[in-house]
Amino acid sequence: MDGGFITGFQGFAEAEATHHPALAGPLGRLVDALESVESVDRNPGPTLPVVDEHLDAALGASTGLAGELLREVAHKVGWARPYPEHVGEPDMDALRASFAYAPIVGARDDGPAPLWASDDVFAGIVLQGPDVIYPSHVHKAAELYWVASGTARWQRGDEWTSHGPGALFFHDTGVRHATVTGHEPTLLLFAWVSDPASVPVIIRH
Ligand SMILES: [Fe+2]
């Protein structure tokens, strides 16, 4: 696989830093980390029902450079469900039935193989189906999220706002966040630009 996606992602992150000067730090870390990724020789990865049902429509509705980047790789990645440790909890079973993520760049661990290997950044795709609540969670990783398609309600800290295609979010270490979809799925490009091996923790009250 050529490096077209990686140089495109770097160029996108650099352009975003000019539009969002407050995020120049994390975006710069992403650009730097993408400099030293290695292509992974791999077979096509696994898919999931939510992907088969919603990915093509969500990709078709995707806008901007995030959408272009996702269209380049979305049919080459392998998909997984998060939070296996929460199986049997009704809200988490509902999330896992209609939520999938796919590594594009990251460590080669026991999940689907990324397209490019890196120990410095974990970047990938999230597809969250319609009417799905991804509960509040935190992680040590500092996280960038771009919305490629779909408008959803987002929590960051104590604030809830509605965002659609083109939005860029930054969740710094330990900032609680959540995503709630309405009638349409949302397709996201994410990058963990610190602590890529950290583990998200659901917040239970
Ligand atoms: Fe997160």
Image (cartoon, grey):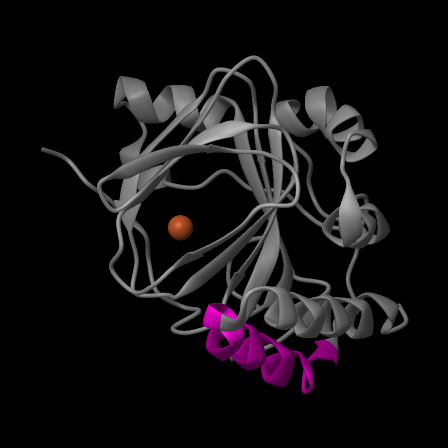
Q: Quick one: which residue is furthest to the left in this view?
A: 205
Is residue 44 visible in the rendered image? The answer is no
Q: Could you tell whether 182 is left or right of 40 in the image?
A: left
Q: Residue 50: x percent and y percent? A: 62, 24
Q: Does the magenta stretch mainly form a helix, a strand or a loop?
A: helix
Q: Is residue 199 above or below residue 153?
A: below
Residue at the image point whose x is 53% and y is 72% from the top: 21
Q: In the image, is 199 to the left or to the right of 14?
A: left
Q: Position of residue 200 (x, y in %)?
A: 32, 52
**Residue 82, percent from left and from top:** 44, 41
Count of numbered circles in the view: 0
Quadrant position of the C terminus in the picture: top left
Q: Which region is colored magenta?
A: 22-38
- Looking at the picture, tell me which residue is in the foreground, 17 or 119: 17
Q: Is residue 122 left or right of residue 2?
A: left
Quarter of the figure that contains the N terminus: bottom right
Q: Residue at x 60, y 71 (%)?
A: 17
Viewer-proximal residue, 149 or 71? 149
- Please determine whether, in this image, residue 64 is positioned above or below residue 26: above
Is 30 placed above or below 84 here? below
Task: Give how far across and how far down residue 178 sits, in percent.
Answer: 35, 37
Residue 78 painted magenta: no
In the picture, residue 31 is in which quadrant? bottom right
Above/below status of 96 relative to 6: above
Q: Residue at x 45, y 28 (%)?
A: 96
Q: Quadrant of residue 61?
A: top right
Residue 203 in sight = yes
